[in-house]
Image: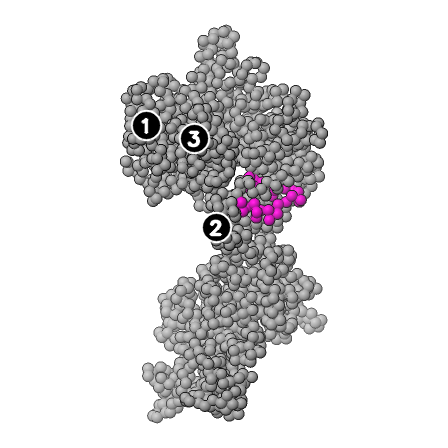
Amino acid sequence: MQKPPPQRGTGMPQGEDPTPTYNNYIRSSLGKGESANHGDHFQGLVALKAYDEKQSDIILKQLSRLLQYGYFTIAGLQQALQVQRIDIGRDEKGLMRIVQHLVLLGLGDGSAGTPLPVPQTAGGMFLAKAVDRLGLEVLVAAWNDLGNERATFLRKQAALRALAAITRASLTSSPDDATYAQGLYETLRGLLDKVDALRAGRRGLAHIISQAHGNRKKNLIADMRQRVEMWSLLRGAFAAARLALPRSALYKVAQRSLSALGSSDPVCARHALALASLVARDPSGCGSFIAAVEPLLRHNVETAKRTGALHLGIMPAKRSGGSSAGDPTQLPDSESHLNLRDTWARVYLARACAAVIQSGHIAGDVGDRGAVFWQALLLLAVADPSERVALEAIRAMFGAPYPRGTTAAAMRAPGAGARLSVATSPAEVDAESSQSKIMGASWHLVMTQALEQPPVQEPGSSSAGGAPGADSVPPVGAAGVRADDAGIFGRVARRLLRCLQSRSHALICGAARTVAVLAESRAWFHSLSGGHGHEAEPDVVRRWMRALHGFLLMLASDDGLSGCERAAALEALIWNQDQLLTPSPGLLLRAVSHGGFTAPPIARYTFADPWPECLLVEVLGVLARRLRCTAGMPPELVLELAGALAAGSPSGMPREALQALWDLAPGPLAARTALQLLSAPLPPLCQPPAAAAVEVKSMAAQAEMAFNNLKAMAACWLGEHVNNIAGEYAWKPWETKMSTGSADAASAAESAAPEVSEGPNAAPRAPHGGDKHKSAGDAGATDASQAGRGIGIGVGGPEAPMARMAEAAVTHSPLLSMSIAQLNRAQLTGAPVVRVAAAQALGKLAVRSGEPYRIQCYSLLAAAVGRIGGVCGGAAADPLGLAPVVDPTIEVLDAMYAGELVLERHVALYGTRARGWPAAALESLRRRHEWLLTTIGCAVCAVPRDLFLPLGPRSRRLLFPNDKEDAEEDARNAAAAEAQQQQEQYGDQQYYDEFGQPYQYDYSTAEQYDYGDYYNNASQQEEDQSDSYGQQHDPLARYDFTGQKAAAAVELNWGAEQPGAYDGVDDATAVAEARPAVVLYSFQAESEGEVSVTVGDSVRVVHDLGEWFQVLTSGGQQGLVPASYIQLLDEQQGTDSGGGRGQTQGSPLQSQLSVGSGSAAGGNSAQPRQRQSAEGAQSGYGYAYGSGGQQESGGGAAGSTSGYYPYQYDNPEYDAGGPDGTYGSYYGDYGSQYGGDPYGANAYGSSVYGGGTYGDEGGKKKKGFGGLDDIGAVLVEAKNAVAAARQQQQSVGPLGSGSSGGQTTTTPPSPSKLALDGFHARSNPLATQSDVTVYDAVSEPGADTWSSPLQEPAPVAAVSTAADGSDRAKAIYEFVAEMPGELSVSAGEELEIIGGEVDGWYNARVVSDPTRTGIIPASYVQMQ
Amino acid sequence: MDVGRIHCFLVATRGGDVIYERFFDRFTELEKAEIRAAFSAASCNVRMHPDQEQDFIAPYKSTRFAFIPVADTVLYLMGSGEYDEVGLVEVLRVIIQVLKDVLGKVPSSGLILEKYAKLALVVDEVINEGLLEAVDKEAIKKGIKGKAAWE
């Protein structure tokens, strides 16, 4: 066994040569005593070297057995090459023929025999081929005979075959190595030259005829035999060229083939015609083809008009005898006409004729120059005895493209058979376009001739004709047959119908495909003629097309046929122009479920047999072309048919192909289809009967899985494309969207409401006018009933902001709203794979969409992972298991929202132009912008870096300042001021778009533009004047109808930041650097230098002295306090939430609230928002403008997530320990990061901040601010606000009375309430960091029993159980305290319940005596 | 020529045991096994009428194959491009007809195994490396004997 050499060229894997062995079946067939040893049989080959006639039978048997091995070894080939040279005698040519076969096996790509048992590991390997192992010097022995004049014809023929085989194999191994191909070409060229010389010389026809006249019979026979030999060699040459020559060389040989069209050898003529048809297709060669073929073909046609058969034209009247081509005694005048005896020759002729007619040389002029070709084509189509020829001729007549073969490598390619063969490159699109034009023109041509009579009469109608035979259609002239059926089209159609009625499956399939070509060319003609094509159609055409389609409709629903026939029938039906016979999705669903030959027999016969991938792709390809053809079937139906295919055979449906089809379709329609699929119920294939066989159930389970995968694909596709389709991008100006995409998308979505009927799960139909509130609710809801609740509970009255937001969303882009709702439904109710895909899609929508879609998606995502507590009551974190998918998106969105908020505040300080900003702040802004872009790209989706502004539209002019624009804006401001005056004068409002151009909301166009309320706020109007650009630009501003945003900005500004705050950074004082802290325990000063503090006091730690802190009390005293008595707020804050926090100058004690207590000032008015209720998660738009980015237990983003989200490693906000990172340690090493940065910590340490609490100690990991980078602070605020709001909301539920409990869980708190809570909390000077106390403090300032000095801060985990509200109750039994802390009450005493129930106990306070507090068993209490 | 090729010819028993296979492209053993499996899956339990030599068609990846049950065997032919269903069936019928002539009777599995070389050579004459070659019965019969048409 030879060792394999290094792989050549293509690098295809090659294994060790296997030892040829028999498989079990062949072993069992061996006779008694017969050897199964390869070596024994190989001896037969060796024995040929010393051939003995007596051993002839034995050798034959051994060689036969050798053929059974399935692999002919390299060693065997070498042996065979040696044997091939031996001449063992005339009688043993049969043995040598076997040797030649073995040589071909060894040289060529293929293999033969029986299946070779190979090790499993070698299954993917190729068997060794001679071309890879042996050099040219060895292999040349295979075709040496070609150079030998004396070699027999058979040897030369074998040599030609061997050369072609090895050339092909070499191209498989090394496509770029043209050694063998060049050799073959040169050989063929020499051979053709020799043959040409022969024809012109002694063995030419003229010479033979003259010899015949001279009656020199002996010489004549010898010459004619040599002549036949010459044709046979020529045949071998053409066959070799067709087999192995690359395209360029093939065209050169093809030019030479024109002279051999009249060969007396029919197979030679066939090969010559095959090559000549290539010339006919070539625009530059078509002329020479016409010149060469027309005179010959004219003879054929003339003869056919007499005899009725084009192919019998070989013996026209010169000889009355037979016409056997192999009989050399006959004298053919073959070179005067085409030899069309071979069936396949006529196939190639049909293609060539069509190519000529369609070429520029004839250009459809079939009445004059192209008459011969047209008549030949007609003869082939209507009169040829071979159905194969007729079908090919009809296809060619109607402009069918040339067939395209495939190769083993193409079949092996990834995705082979699963890709939709649609044109992608411009060249392909052009080719496809020209092909459709050819088809349309061909139809037109046939229509002009449709009623003409064919060149020959039908056998049944001719005077000498016999019976019509198997023709089921009565002959022309008989009763019931119309006269126009005798025309060309009638004849063609009747022939097709006969084929369709055949018993042969292949013929049915071929005929159906031919009808499909007819229908396609008709459709293209209608399309290209602008829909007027039908006007020129004769009645007979319409009648026959309808008849054919009716028959095909029957075939398509016939379960007895295989998928191939039905696919072809469907293909024809899809192209059908007749509305009555259009295939329905139901038909496809049924058709696709049977005849695929993929299911086990029991499933096939009892349940279903879905189509395989290749058939589905074929039909999808037809649908794709149908989409491009504008006439006939509407694109909606095309897409529905594709959906039916998917439902009929989910396992077979390749997702790439379906996606490709959607990509081709008009966007809104494709989105509709995707939505349909997303919300579709399981197809029948997934629901076998309970008593079905296990194979059936297994198949159904696979189908279900595949269908879910398709749904997931639909979700992915929606996430990727729906923004584009809806024209809604965060980076597109709102006004542009309104004017362009909106109307289309709205109208499309109007018609795009999925029609999948699923009862309560029916997809909502997008509104387009009518009742606004109803439409808002509908579009936002996936469940009708829940939608109602969403309206009633979540949105409330007309003043409810969510209602208007939802309404705005729906009216602006119904499609997007509907997609969001459907994706949410899929996210909540779908199979896991669908959930994940839907969540990812929602994430993409959230990032790419502007408001309010972003906040909607954000809320839905947050609800899905249980952050809001709406799903599963909030008890279980991540009830759907989506956290790994959703969390990265949420983090990104949090960062975007928080960043936008910070930016807004800075804009309030420094204006909207970059020139007003400190350089450090701008740099920080850029860093934040870049980081967000990178993170979005890594974690969510691709966004255009040049266009997308994650920090909001305001950041554009800051990031990309433009002097020209600034100048223009100045001018506009002046104009705006003037306009404002006019406005004041006339009460009219003028708005400006992004580019400063005034535009007018057109309220007369109803709901689309109904945002007027948002701008009615007086303070907003003022802002409009001062910052019209920013106001108009901020998408959130459109929805900031409560006016809280501005208020919140004031509340949350970072201390008394003023313009210039970043200046003077060198004047940092110790006081300014003081860190906020709270006193845990009261401390009495005992010695000098110490200072007395009381528990709960808020102080500033000026110096950290280890065990002692030097503090600054609120009274202005400085002194030492034991460190253990002090809780540093910034430290705790950093530990808990991972972010520093801003602080206002005027209320230092508010810092106490910053941890977990929920300073809601920022969040409640600004971007991060959430949905609160379980129903809200389903109902779509019951949003609460509270806050966002809430983390369970107040856990900081860094602490809770940085461990497993890789993208956060680059996040400066979360990079707590990486001082060497690109952005430095954000909270950590200020010394390295901001040491020389005027915008860094020192800025905040300046005296400007007075009693500011910004901790900053160089080198220590302290938390602080980083200006715009300090998104964490805002996040913490927002999250705390949410936590507080949630706790309050939850507390109302369980602790409230029974009657109100249900409602509170479904009622999202209104923004105003959240804001109120937040403000209360902030204004409470006695509140501590305990979450519980905050709301106690709100209700009863100063009476907080949970914040006793000795009490440790409540564990965060307890927050969820210890409610912070209070409620009235009544003791129904007497309870006597047994343990300290318990509350003794008598029956009937009024109680105030503080917090929720904990382990069956309430914390209560006696109403009549508030000093009596304690815990009491819940069963002793009745809530009131 | 990219207009079409014959990729595979295969003869198997009705039970699925492969008697003869001829691949004309360089497939891996795994791909060959897949093709055999597709043939077998398509033809198993197909309602065949042994005497009628009904043709059937089925798809495999981007190709088609046709099969015709003859006696206790099934003959398959796989092709693409111009070798579509009708063409494949036509070629199959040529092979079956010549086999009947050459073998003297209907090609059964036992007969084929016995006259294995004849089957191989008939196929070789009809299909030359994936290209349809001879269809004339007499020419094929002479070809497998190693004789030219005039000999």
Q: Amino acid at mark 2?
A: Ala
Find the magenta span and give its range.
A565-594
At mark 1, the secondary structure is helix
What residue does disc 2 label? A693
At mark 3, the secondary structure is loop
**Magenta: predominant secondary structure element?**
helix
Q: Amino acid at mark 3?
A: Ser
Q: CA distance from mark 1 to mark 3?
A: 21 Å
What residue does disc 1 label? A62
- Side of A448 where A843 appears, left or right: left
Image position, residue A387 (x, y; %): 57, 30
User: Given the image, what chain letter belongs to the residue carrying mark 1?
Assistant: A
Q: Which label lies toward us, 1 or 2?
A: 2
Q: Amino acid at mark 1?
A: Gln
Q: Residues within 10 Å of mark 3 (few under 14, many from 20)?
A: some
**Is residue A524 visible to us here?**
no
Q: CA distance from mark 1 to mark 2?
A: 48 Å
Quadrant of the image for the C terminus of chain A?
A: bottom right
What residue does disc 3 label? B108
Image position, residue A227 (x, y; %): 46, 16
Image position, residue A388 (x, y; %): 55, 30
Q: CA distance from mark 3 to mark 2?
A: 35 Å
